[in-house]
Image (spheres, rainbow, N blue to C red):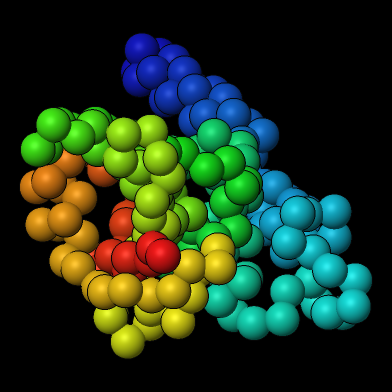
Amino acid sequence: MKHKILMISLLVVMLMGMTTVYAQDAARPGTPEDNECNPGGVLYREENQDGCPTVWYWKAGWFLSRYNRGQISLADFPTEFESVLPSSVNSICSARMLDENSWFACMSSDQTGYESINGVHTREMLFVYDANECPASAHNMPFRYAEDTQSYMYDFYHFNESQIASIGNIGSVSCIYFD
């Protein structure tokens, strides 16, 4: 009987300890650690009265607070809310020889890219999801054509899946601009 009481007491003490650890990790409501839309958070704007203007921002703020605290990784961050992440732009680049010309291209996480031939900057790219989204010009260069990003950048420059994953989702359509 004493053995059972001792085991139950030990179990209760262990559970109390776990509750204390959990309580320390849980974010307090109304703080940036709970949602970056709360006062003091990076998405909070005083003029909005309630921190963020839409439900989308509140959801983004919730994920951003967990990302900022290291509770979720960049890989686990929902793509729907990536625009609220810190503005570091990641890029991947690749070179290729074709017809005695050296072709070089880069794709970036901000949905832009460029291409040069023999060291001369020749083309700008925007990555979108529908060819109708291609603007008429980019960086004072007129729009020339839209190409499937998979075939143009992956196949021509041989970017691999891990490279693409390192910069996040890239639009499936490449808007190509050059003079």
Question: Seen in the image, is 25 located left or right of residue 10?
Answer: right
Quick one: 104 or 85, which is closer to the camera?
A: 104
* The C terminus sits in image quarter: bottom left
State the count of labels: 0
* The N terminus sits in image quarter: top left
Which quadrant holds residue 55? bottom right
Residue beneath the point at 33% across and 69% down: 175
Quick one: 83 or 135, which is closer to the camera?
A: 135
Residue beneath the point at 79% across and 71% down: 51
Quick one: 90 or 68, which is closer to the camera?
A: 90
Question: Where 123 falls versus 142 (above or below)?
Answer: above
Quick one: 47 or 117, which is closer to the camera?
A: 117
Question: Where 92 falls versus 55 (above or below)?
Answer: above
Which quadrant holds residue 104? top left
Residue reaching furthest to the bottom: 132
Residue beneath the point at 55% across and 68% down: 140
Which quadrant holds residue 17? top right
From where the camera sits, is residue 166 visible? no
Question: Seen in the image, is 102 located left or right of residue 15?
Answer: left
Residue 13: x %, y % from top left = 54, 23
Residue 72: x %, y % from top left = 46, 41
Question: Where 36 falls versus 140 (above or below)?
Answer: above
Residue beneath the point at 56% across and 76% down: 56
Residue 47: x %, y % from top left = 90, 78
Residue 64: x %, y % from top left = 58, 52
From where the camera sits, is residue 117 visible? yes
